[in-house]
Amino acid sequence: MALIVVDFDGTITESDSLVEIVQTHAPQLFDELEGDLDAGRITLHQCIEREFAAVRGDHDTIVSEAVGRVRVRAGFAEFVAAAQAAGHRVVVVSSGFEAIIRPVLLRDGVPEVEVFAHEVRFSAEGGAVEFRHGDQCDACGQECKRSVVAALRDGGEVVYVGDGYSDRCAALAADRVFARRELARDLAAEGVAYEPFDDFVSVRAALGL
Ligand SMILES: [Mg+2]
Ligand SMILES: [Zn+2]
């Protein structure tokens, strides 16, 4: 039995719901803070906190717009069902928000899965983020997903599926990695083996499910 850890934005989904919200509501700040993050001037949590503080409006409206934009990558519901039927534990670990993740999974018929994510509450004064995971990481010194994976692993194989910045450190601690986009580039640059993926039909086939 394996622990299968799957990122949400850009991995389960075709585009990044967080990026889309911030680019829509605070485009200039987005460019500035992403630059600061890439340069190591701010942490990921600081970046998320500052970006969403600039997103102002009605909570339900912003959430339903975001959920409506999100497209789930082909084969994800079937992948989860097959993995669970084979006795594997599938967990979604996200630097995004449960308020968006849960309705998307429900809408797309994904079987019940554990979700480890943060939460946000939008208002006219700006979004308030509640960070729920990501203790200071021994490996990278930042608040990162690796600690979540470390707490969940039980001695069996760990499979990681991800696409971005927040997956880099956790993916290095996994036994098998499926990567795309930024995560794939980072792992390639570090000489770390990974398997590319475009949808969950191929991930499922690669895992023999
Ligand atoms: Mg992602
Ligand atoms: Zn780390």
Image (tube, helix red, strand yellow):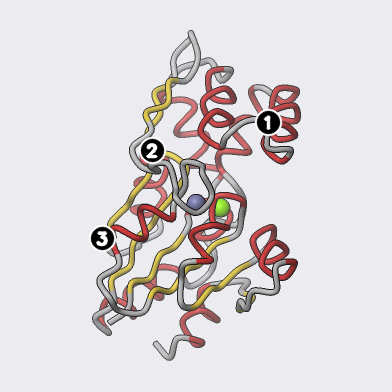
Q: Quadrant of residue 80?
A: bottom left
Say which element carries label 3: loop
> Residue 77, image x and y in percent?
39, 68
Q: Closer to the observer: label 3 or label 1?
A: 1
* Numbered badge on residue 41: 1
**Residue 52, relative to residue 198: is it above or below?**
above
The answer to whether 154 is drawn above or below residue 105 in the figure is below
Please rate how many residues cluster around mark 3, counting C-alpha atoms within 10 Å: few if below 14, some from 14 to 19, many from 20: some
Mark whose residue sits in front, 1 or 2: 1
Q: Give, as a three-letter code, the residue at label 1.
A: Arg
> Mark 2 vs ligand 1: CB under 8 Å?
no
Q: Amino acid at mark 3?
A: Glu
The three-letter amino acid code for the residue at tag 2 is His
Query: In front of the other: label 2 or label 3?
Result: 2
Query: At numbered mark 1, what does the secondary structure look like: helix, strand or loop?
Result: loop
Disc on the earlier residue, 2 or 3: 3
- Quarter holding residue 135: top left
Quarter placement of the N terminus: bottom left
- Left or right side of 196 for 61: left
Q: Position of residue 176 (x, y in %)?
A: 49, 78
Q: Mark 2 — residue?
A: 118
Q: Residue furthest top?
A: 125
> Percent from the top left, x then y, of residue 160?
47, 68
Residue at mark 1 to residue at mark 2: CA–CA distance: 22 Å
Residue 112's label in the rendered image is 3
